Image (cartoon, rainbow, N blue to C red):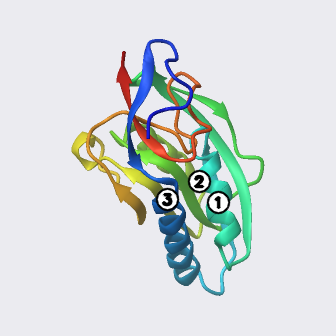
Amino acid sequence: MTDPLGVVNGMRVGRTLLTQEAIESRVSQLAAEVSARYAGKEVTLVSILKGSFVFLADLTRRLTIPTRVDFLGISSYQGTESSEDIRWTTRLTSPVIGRHVLVVEDILDTGRTLSRIIDHLRDQEPASLRLCALLDKPNRRVAPVEADFVGFTIPDVFVVGYGLDYDGWFRQLPYVGVLERV
């Protein structure tokens, strides 16, 4: 499937990497895994903005445990490149001290950004802290971060759709596609 949006800022979706059906099925499986791991506990889901909002919504609706939702915003991408220059754009609205926290992220790439997020949350003394990533690119990892729950392991390609973007574009696609320059 090619991108119905056509060319945006000299980029387009060249091929589908993960279909909508594959994503829906795996998110249901992840929700079952998370619900089993946290059975009998309340969990605070911390979504990393903006890319994980679609994944968070779908995952949350499928969970069978009591949850609260909060958001952290941090920016590290410029175009298709991950930068070491990261900045906080949104802070938590509720304390997580003594709570079970599950970070919900769209993609675990170099690990630099998630390493900072995890350190930030650990400093707040949660009862437990785990990571759920829809996508994992282990070949790009430079920081020692591993997800406790992974939807899909993908190759080192730039992907968009299902909340992931290129300069704010392509988030609304119901599948994950590989971005290519035209």
Q: Position of residue 142 (x, y in %)?
A: 26, 40
| Residue pictured at 42% horizontal, 39% vertical | 177
Label placed on residue 55: 2
| Residue pictured at 43% horizontal, 19% vertical | 11
Q: Which residue is mark 3?
A: 23
Callout 3 secondary element? helix
Which image quadrant: the N terminus?
A: top left
Q: Nearer the viewer, residue 74 or 166?
A: 166
Q: Amino acid at mark 2?
A: Phe
Outermost residue, left side = 139
Label placed on residue 58: 1
Residues at circles 1 and 2 in contact by the CB criterion of under 8 Å:
yes
The label nearer to you, 1 versus 3, is 3
Residue 129 position (above or below residue 88):
below
Residues at circles 1 and 3 in contact by the CB criterion of under 8 Å:
no
Report the side of 43 relative to 112 (left or right).
Answer: right
Question: Could you tell me how far apart the alpha carbons at marks 1 and 2 are, in whole angstroms?
Answer: 5 Å
